[in-house]
Image (tube, rainbow, N blue to C red):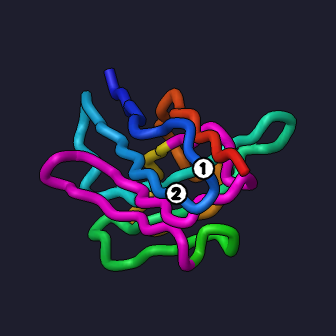
């Protein structure tokens, strides 16, 4: 049973920081890309950040670039998202996901496994 569990979300003020974690179990994903997506009420799930299988390559949505940092620890089967200078527009449920391939993809269809999400709420 493959399971991804996100943690680290919460209620913060604009300008604050959070670090999200995603712990994977039931398999190893060191040869696959991983990513973070988010979904706000009434909106489609959107790509936030991705990281290649080795961690050598990263890619960010324009909204996240310069503020968020994605990283992974393959030995621990864990994915991270450091979020700095949070804005109210960042309010959403954040999901981690494992891709089918080694390389970053920004589309949800490229990912086989998903966590249940962690809520991030940013007040102004």
- Classify mark 2: helix, strand or loop: loop
- Label 2, residues with CA under 10 Å away: few <14, some 14-19, many ≥20: some
- Indicate yes or no whether the magenta region holds residue 70: yes
Residue drawn where x is 69% and y is 69% of the image = 63
Quarter that holds the N terminus: top left
Q: Which residues are magenta?
A: 66-95
Identity of the residue furthest to the right in this view? 42
Q: From this viewpoint, is residue 102 visible? A: yes
Residue drawn where x is 67% and y is 41% of the image = 92
Residue on which disc 1 sits: 13
93 horizontally vs 26: left or right: right
The picture places residue 106, in percent across and down from the top left corner, at 62, 62
Q: Camera-side residue: 8 or 103?
A: 8
- Indicate yes or no whether the magenta region holds residue 47: no
Q: CA distance from mark 2 to mark 1?
A: 6 Å
Q: Camera-side residue: 87 or 65?
A: 87
Vertical comparison of 23 with 109: above or below: above
Residue on which disc 2 sits: 16
Residue drawn where x is 58% and y is 76% of the image = 65
* CB contact under 8 Å: marks 2 and 1: yes
48 horizontally vs 101: left or right: right
The picture places residue 90, in percent across and down from the top left corner, at 67, 53
């Amino acid at each position: 049973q493959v399971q991804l569990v996100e943690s680290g979300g919460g209620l913060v003020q604009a300008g604050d920081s959070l670090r999200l974690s995603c712990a994977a179990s039931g398999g190893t994903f060191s040869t696959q890309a991983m990513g973070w997506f988010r979904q706000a009420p009434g909106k489609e799930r959107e790509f936030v950040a991705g990281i290649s299988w080795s961690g050598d390559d990263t890619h960010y949505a324009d909204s996240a670039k310069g503020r968020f940092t994605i990283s992974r620890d393959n030995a621990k089967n864990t994915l991270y998202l450091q979020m700095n200078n949070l804005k109210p527009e960042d309010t959403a449920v954040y999901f981690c996901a494992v891709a089918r391939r080694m390389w970053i993809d920004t589309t949800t269809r490229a990912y086989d496994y998903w966590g249940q999400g962690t809520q991030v709420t940013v007040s102004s």
